Image (cartoon, rainbow, N blue to C red):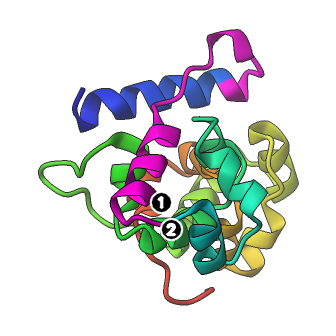
C-alpha cells in the first residue's frame, strides 16, 4: 500500500476509535515500522527509550501495538521519536512520504479554524469541546498545547477546525504559541 491507502486506513481507524468501536479499529502497521527503524539503527529498546527520554515500557508498547502511536503518545512525543529513529512521522504512520509533499500546517492555523467553527456554529469553546470530545481551552491559551494531544485528539480537533491533521502532525512546531 502507498501513502494514500495507508492514510485512508488511519482515517477509518481513527473514526472507529472515536466512536469507541474497537472491533472495527485496525490501524496501519506503525508498530512494525517503529521496530524496523530501531533495528536498522541497531539500537536496543533501552537505547531508543533513553534517547527518546521516555520509559522503556512505553517504547516497548509502541513496537507491539499499532494503535499506540495514534492513541497514546502525544504528537510531540511522536515527532521526537521519529527524530530519534532518524525517520519521519509519515514513514512511521503511513510507510512513506506523500508525493507531492503535503503543505505544512501550524498550530495557530488549527486554532484559527476552531475560531471560525465556533463563530459559524455559534458555539462556545466548551460547547465545541464537548462536541468533539476534547478540552479546547488550553489550545486557545497556547496553540502549542496541540502537540500535547495524541494523534487521535489532533485528528478530532483538526476535523472541527477544517484543517489537515497530517499537515499538522508532520510539522515541527518551533514555539509553543
> Is 59 above or below relative to 9?
below
* Farthest bottom residue in view: 175
Residue 145 placed where, x, y %?
Answer: 70, 73
Residue in front for this viewpoint, 15 or 80: 80
The residue pinned by badge 1 equals 169
**Farthest top residue?**
23
Reading the chain from its start, which is encountered first: label 1 or label 2? Answer: 2
Q: Determine the residue positioned at 80% across, 41% down.
A: 133
The residue labelled by disc 2 is: 79
Residue nearest the observer in this picture, 99 or 124: 99
Magenta includes 33? Answer: yes
Q: Which quadrant of the figure has residue 149?
A: bottom right
Q: Which residues are magenta?
A: 17-43
Q: Looking at the image, is 120 positioned above or below residue 32?
A: below
Check if mark 1's residue and mark 2's residue have beta carbons within 8 Å: yes
Q: Secondary structure at mark 2?
A: helix
Quadrant of the snapshot with the N terminus:
top left
Question: Quick one: label 2, few (<14), some, or many (20+) residues within 10 Å?
Answer: many
Q: Is residue 119 above or below residue 61?
A: below
Residue 85 visible in this rendered orientation of the protein = yes
Position of the C terminus by quadrant = bottom right
Amino acid at each position: 500500500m502507498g501513502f494514500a491507502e495507508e492514510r485512508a486506513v488511519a482515517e477509518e481507524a481513527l473514526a472507529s476509535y472515536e466512536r469507541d468501536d474497537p472491533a472495527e479499529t485496525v490501524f496501519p502497521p506503525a508498530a512494525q515500522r517503529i521496530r524496523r527503524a530501531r533495528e536498522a539503527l541497531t539500537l536496543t529498546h533501552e537505547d531508543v527509550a533513553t534517547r527518546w527520554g521516555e520509559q522503556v515500557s512505553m517504547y516497548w508498547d509502541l513496537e507491539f501495538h499499532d494503535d499506540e502511536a495514534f492513541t497514546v503518545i502525544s504528537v510531540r512525543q511522536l515527532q521526537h521519536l521519529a527524530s530519534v529513529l532518524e525517520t519521519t512521522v509519515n514513514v512511521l504512520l503511513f510507510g512513506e512520504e506523500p508525493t507531492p509533499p503535503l503543505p505544512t500546517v501550524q498550530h495557530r492555523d488549527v486554532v484559527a479554524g476552531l475560531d471560525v467553527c465556533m463563530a459559524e456554529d455559534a458555539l462556545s469553546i466548551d460547547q465545541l469541546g464537548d462536541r468533539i470530545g476534547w478540552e479546547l481551552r488550553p489550545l486557545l491559551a497556547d496553540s502549542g498545547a496541540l502537540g500535547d494531544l495524541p494523534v487521535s485528539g489532533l485528528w478530532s480537533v483538526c476535523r472541527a477546525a477544517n484543517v489537515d491533521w497530517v499537515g499538522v502532525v508532520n510539522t515541527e512546531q518551533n514555539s509553543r504559541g
